[in-house]
Amino acid sequence: MVKGFDCATKLNSITAAGLRKEGFEYVARYLGNSWKSFDKAETKAIQDAGLKLISIFQKSNNGIQFFSKEQGISHAKEAEGFAKAVEQPEGIAIYFAVDFNAL
């Protein structure tokens, strides 16, 4: 079984290497400009540790009104800009969070 995790905590070379040593293979981190988002240095630490990286882009998204074609396009463009800024490798998934019970 492949082991991975997501976290809001910033990883560095020591923590990333320790998580890889514990058998984790990938990490999901947050794109953006907030306390929980990652930067270029963290991208490098994750990759140098041998972990795969996927990213999560999360805006408010806490109600149905946030889900429209226009909003999706806007969020995708914003996420792409953040991904380029942290030098996320091409072809790596960006997941978009839903922050409410959609049922």
Image (cartoon, rainbow, N blue to C red):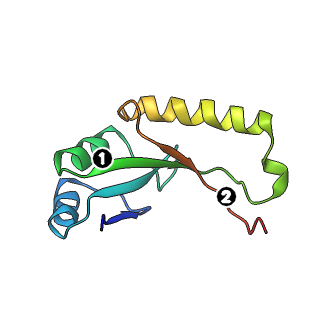
The reply to whether the C-beta atoms of the residues labelled 2 and 1 are less than 8 Å apart is no
Image mark count: 2
Q: Which residue appears at 42% of the width and 53% of the height?
A: 29
Specify whether 96 is left or right of 2.
right
Residue 63 position within the rendered picture, expressed as x and y whole percent measured from the top left: 80, 59
Query: What distance separates the C-alpha of mark 2 from that of mark 1?
Result: 25 Å
Q: Quadrant of residue 24?
A: bottom left
**Residue 33, placed above or below residue 20:** above
Residue 50 position within the rendered picture, expressed as x and y whole percent measured from the top left: 19, 50
Q: Which residue appears at 31% of the width and 66% of the height?
A: 3
Pair 2/1: label in front: 2
Q: Amino acid at mark 1?
A: Glu
> Which residue is nearer to you in this view: 36 or 78?
78
> Which residue is nearer to you in this view: 66 or 69?
69
Q: Which mark is residue 42?
A: 1
Query: What crowding class fits label 2: few (fewer than 14 Cα within 10 Å), some (14-19), or many (20 or more)?
Result: some
User: Where is the C terminus found, in terms of image quarters?
Assistant: bottom right
User: Where is the N terminus found, in terms of image quarters?
Assistant: bottom left
Q: Amino acid at mark 2?
A: Val
Residue 45 position within the rendered picture, expressed as x and y whole percent measured from the top left: 22, 47
- Residue position for label 2: 98
> Which residue is nearer to you in this view: 35 or 59?
59
**Residue 54, placed above or below residue 62:** above
Q: Helix, strand or loop at disc 2?
A: loop
Q: Helix, strand or loop at disc 1?
A: helix
The disc, 2 or 1, on the residue closer to the chain's N-terminal end is 1
Specify whether 24 is left or right of 102.
left
